[in-house]
């Protein structure tokens, strides 16, 4: 386990032309901390952590945060703390004119991950929590 407890988040931000890069700041069995740099027009696709929670602290920029598999979104801005409880669909579209920069904490670190497809109505056999 790392003994470092203070990190300069700017050292982990990785702008890219393709998909935004998940840049791990630190990881333990309890959580993984990730820095995100999402350029205007880029998207973190809707996904779920079936065995854990993903909490985002928005440092700068704005976006439309996915709330469910139907594609419902809500605006998020710098200063917001956004929580996707276990099984909640989440992701973001940067619809602003500046980068969306945030820190994500997924807990526990083995929370799992899978992409979800947006649909007009959820499949009744899906394991996603719809009341998030």
Image (tube, rainbow, N blue to C red):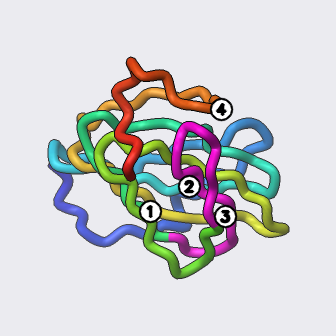
Q: Which mark is residue 36?
A: 2
Residue under the image location 68 percent in, 72 percent down: 61
Earlier along the polypeptide chain: callout 2 or callout 1?
2
Say whether marks 2 and 1 touch (CB < 8 Å). yes
Percent across and percent down for residue 2 are 20, 53
- So how many labels did they put on this image? 4
Earlier along the polypeptide chain: callout 3 or callout 1?
1
Task: Give the structural element (helix, strand or loop) at label 3.
Answer: strand
Q: Which mark is residue 120?
A: 4
- Is residue 63 a member of the stretch shown in magenta? yes
Q: Is residue 126 above or below residue 72?
A: above
Which residue, given by chain and number where applicable, does mark 1 sit on? 56
Q: Is residue 40 visible?
A: yes
Task: Give the structural element (helix, strand or loop) at label 2.
Answer: strand
Task: Give the structural element (helix, strand or loop) at label 4.
Answer: loop
Task: Give the structural element (helix, strand or loop) at label 1.
Answer: strand
Which residue, given by chain and number where applicable, does mark 3 sit on? 100
Residue under the image location 59 percent in, 78 percent down: 78
Say whether marks 1 and 4 touch (CB < 8 Å). no
- Give residue 64's quadrant in the image: bottom right
């Amino acid at each position: 386990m790392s003994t470092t407890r203070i990190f300069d988040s700017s050292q982990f931000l990785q702008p890219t032309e393709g998909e935004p890069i998940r840049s791990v700041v630190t990881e333990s069995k309890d959580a993984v901390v990730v820095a995100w740099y999402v350029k205007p027009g880029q998207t973190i696709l809707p996904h779920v952590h079936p065995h854990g929670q993903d909490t985002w602290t928005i440092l700068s920029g704005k976006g439309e945060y996915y709330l469910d598999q139907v594609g419902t979104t809500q605006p998020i801005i710098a200063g917001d703390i956004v929580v996707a409880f276990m099984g909640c669909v989440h992701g973001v579209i940067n619809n602003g004119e500046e980068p969306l920069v945030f820190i994500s904490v997924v807990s526990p670190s083995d929370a799992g991950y899978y992409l979800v497809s947006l649909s007009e109505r959820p499949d009744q056999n899906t394991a996603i929590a719809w009341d998030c």
